[in-house]
Every structure is written in structure tokens, then in C-alpha cells.
């Protein structure tokens, strides 16, 4: 069925307070691979002999810090990656003074690079690091993306990223729930909605217009009023244009 973008565009104009919940698919056009994709899963397993859930777990980080960082620097961090048309469409909505909150499962900082201010990074950010000994904070620009990064005190730096076995930030979750309760429109894109607890957030949506953008069908399609099987950047440009 053809997607009636102008119809949805008009509906959004009448329901302008938006929460956008996004996942890896938002950043793949910026050259950041989805490590949860079939190919990503295969690459980790074949190179390191463990699944990515193990590689990106708190235990693995503590016990195999060097291998963790080898994977992390080569796969999770793409210095020089630029925001793509999807990031820019979301940012332009906010720049026009319209209310939008971005909840992202991505850790690449590209929404902020595009100019978005109201961004909740549910899984943290590869742009930030902290010393496990003294707590001193570092930005990605301040450290060499190679081997195990150390603090000036000698302590090992940990990325400010939520690893498996680690809880999500409570206050960030609370703010996300509030944003969802008091918005008109929920747009979900670039995620197959199978990563919890972020995916469970959609149950707090208190508005009336819900739209899912994903190339392939997801188990959660039935939750949404409208489902768009199209490219995320194309869809966002159409839905959020002036
Ligand atoms: Zn330190």
C-alpha cells in the first residue's frame, strides 16, 4: 500500500508535540554499522568467539578490558561520522521552535551534531569517558581511540555507555516516560523494538498519533496507528517538513 505522506504530515501538524524513539537504523547511513544486525552478530562471533551480548557486558569489560577496547574502537566508535538526512530532519523540526524530544538507543552523538538539543541518550555515549579510580571525565576528543585509555591518575577509563548487565539511568528513564506521557505524537524509527527496557517505553505513550518507520515488519507493528515501511530519512523528511 502506498504511503500517504501528505495525510500524515497534516496529522502531525495537528499533533505537534513529538517524541521520537530511534535505534541503530537512524545511524547506518552515517556509516555506523548495526552490531545487532545479522552481519554484525556474525562478525563479532567469528572474530572474537563470543556473542556481542558477552563482548559488551560489564563482566567482559572488567575481565577482558583489552579485547573489549579492541572491539569497541573498531566497531562502536566512528570518529568523523557525520549526521545524515534523518538526524537533520529531526533537528530542523526543533530549530523551527517546535516541541520534539529524541529518545535514542544510539551512542554516537550524531543527533547533537545535527543540532538537536532535547536528546535523551538511553544507552549513554561513546563521546564520554570516566576514570574508574578517581571519576575524572574525558571527552572522546581528549583520548586516543586505541588500546586501553588511561586517566592522568593511571586509572582505566570506561566509556559512559550502558553495557549489558548494567542498569539504565533512572532519572533519564523517568524524564523519557514523562516526555512520552505528555506528547501528542510518537514516531519510532530505525529500531526493531526488541531491545529492552528502551523498547518497553512505548507503553507510556499518552498521545493519540503513533507512527512506526521501519524497512521490515516488527513484532510491535500492531501497537502503532500507522506503519511506514520506507527509508527512515525519506520518511522523516516528509513527515517533519515545514
Ligand atoms: Zn583518574
Image (cartoon, rainbow, N blue to C red):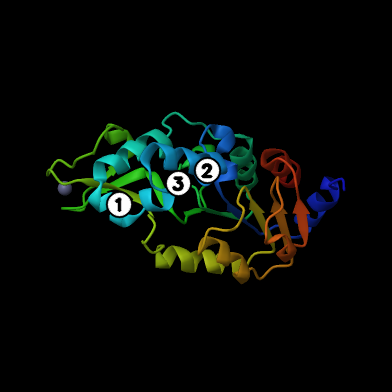
In front: 193, or 6?
A: 193
Q: How busy is the neighbourhood of tag 2: few (under 14 within 10 Å), some, or many (20 plus)?
A: many
Instruction: Give me the disc on residue 111.
Output: 2
> Mark 1: which secondary structure?
helix
The residue lying furthest to the top in this view is: 80
Q: Is residue 242 visible?
A: no
Residue 27 figure quarter: top right
The image shows residue 99, relative to residue 204, as above or below, that is above
Q: How busy is the neighbourhood of tag 1: few (under 14 within 10 Å), some, or many (20 plus)?
A: some
| Quadrant in which the C terminus is drawn | top right
In front: 126, or 95?
A: 126
Residue 154 figure quarter: top left
Q: How many numbered discs sit on the rendered protein?
A: 3
Comparing labels 2 and 3, the label whose residue is closer to the camera: 3
> Mark 2: which secondary structure?
helix
Q: How busy is the neighbourhood of tag 3: few (under 14 within 10 Å), some, or many (20 plus)?
A: many
Question: Percent position (x, y) of residue 170?
Answer: 41, 67
Instruction: Give me the disc on residue 60.
Output: 1
What distance separates the C-alpha of mark 2 from that of mark 1? Answer: 29 Å
Amino acid at each position: 500500500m502506498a504511503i500517504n505522506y501528505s495525510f500524515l504530515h497534516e496529522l502531525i501538524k495537528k499533533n505537534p508535540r513529538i517524541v521520537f524513539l530511534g535505534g541503530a537504523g537512524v545511524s547506518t547511513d552515517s556509516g555506523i554499522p548495526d552490531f545487532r544486525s545479522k552481519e554484525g552478530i556474525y562478525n563479532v562471533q567469528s572474530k572474537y568467539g563470543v556473542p556481542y551480548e558477552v563482548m559488551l557486558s560489564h563482566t567482559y569489560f572488567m575481565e577482558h578490558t583489552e579485547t573489549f577496547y579492541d572491539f569497541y574502537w573498531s566497531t562502536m566508535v566512528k570518529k568523523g561520522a557525520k549526521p545524515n538526512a534523518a538526524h537533520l530532519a529531526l533537528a530542523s523540526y526543533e530549530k523551527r521552535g517546535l516541541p520534539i524530544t529524541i529518545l535514542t538507543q544510539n551512542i554516537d552523538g550524531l543527533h547533537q551534531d545535527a543540532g538537536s538539543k532535547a536528546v535523551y541518550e538511553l544507552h549513554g555515549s561513546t563521546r564520554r569517558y570516566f576514570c574508574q579510580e578517581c571519576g575524572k571525565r574525558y571527552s572522546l576528543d581528549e583520548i586516543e581511540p586505541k588500546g586501553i585509555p588511561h586517566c592522568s591518575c593511571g586509572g582505566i577509563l570506561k566509556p559512559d555507555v550502558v553495557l549489558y548487565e548494567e542498569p539504565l539511568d533512572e532519572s533519564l528513564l523517568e524524564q523519557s516516560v514523562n516526555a512520552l506521557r505528555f506528547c501528542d505524537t510518537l514516531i519510532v524509527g530505525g529500531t526493531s523494538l526488541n531491545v529492552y527496557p528502551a523498547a518497553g517505553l512505548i507503553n507510556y505513550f499518552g498521545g493519540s498519533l503513533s507512527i512506526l518507520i521501519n524497512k521490515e515488519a516488527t513484532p510491535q507493528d500492531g501497537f502503532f496507528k500507522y506503519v511506514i515501511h520506507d527509508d527512515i530519512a525519506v520518511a522523516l523528511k516528509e513527515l517533519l517538513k515545514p
